[in-house]
Amino acid sequence: MTKTVIVSRHDGAILWLKSHGIEGEIHPAWKNENISLLNKGDVVIGNLPLTMISKILESGATFGLLNLPEVPLEKRGKELTPEELTTFGANVMEIKGIEIGGRLV
C-alpha cells in the first residue's frame, strides 16, 4: 500500500494541500534516515534540500515540490494562510529527476 508524506511545519500549507485533496502523514521535518521507510509509489510533498529529493527519487518514491512562485518579499519567512498561498500561485510540481555534481566550495 502506498502512502503520502507531507513534510511541512506550516499549518497554512497543510490546509492548502488538504483543500486540494492531498492528505497524508504529516512530518514537520524529514531526515535522510526516513527515506529507508519509503516504498516505490509513495509520494513525498514539501520543500526539501536537493540532495534529499534526489535520494527520495532513487528510492522509487515520487517527490512533489510545494512551489510558491509569487510570494512577495515582505511575506517571506511568515506564516501564510491557504488563501494567501492561492493568491501567490501555490502549486505542487512533480520533480522527476535531479542531477547533482560535485561541490563548488
Image: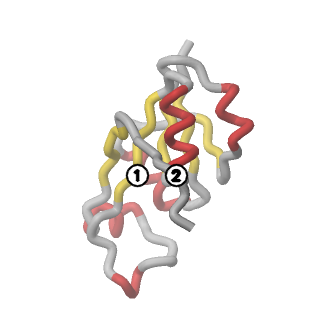
Q: Which residue is mark 2?
A: 102
Q: Nearer the viewer, mark 2 or mark 1?
A: 2
Q: What's the residue at 49%, 54% (across, down)? A: 47
Q: Amino acid at mark 2?
A: Gly
Residue 7 is situated, as x and y percent measured from the top left of the image, at 57, 47
Image position of 10 with respect to 7: above or below: below
Residue 16 is situated, as x and y percent measured from the top left of the image, at 40, 53
Q: Earlier in the sequence, mark 2 or mark 1?
A: 1
Residue 94 is situated, as x and y percent measured from the top left of the image, at 34, 38
Location of the N terminus (image quadrant): top right
Instruction: Residue at the far top: name it.
Output: 1
Image position of 9 with respect to 71: above or below: above
How far is disc 2 from disc 1 in space, using C-alphas? 26 Å
Location of the C terminus (image quadrant): bottom right
Residue 52 location, quadrant: top right
Image position of 88 with respect to 28: above or below: below
Classify mark 1: helix, strand or loop: strand
Q: Amino acid at mark 1?
A: Leu
Residue 70 location, quadrant: bottom left
Q: Is residue 14 visible?
A: no
Other residues around mark 2 within 10 Å, as few (<14) / some (14–19) / many (≥20): few
Q: What's the residue at 65%, 33% (across, down)? A: 35
Q: What's the residue at 54%, 34% (across, down)? A: 56
Q: Which residue is mark 1?
A: 66
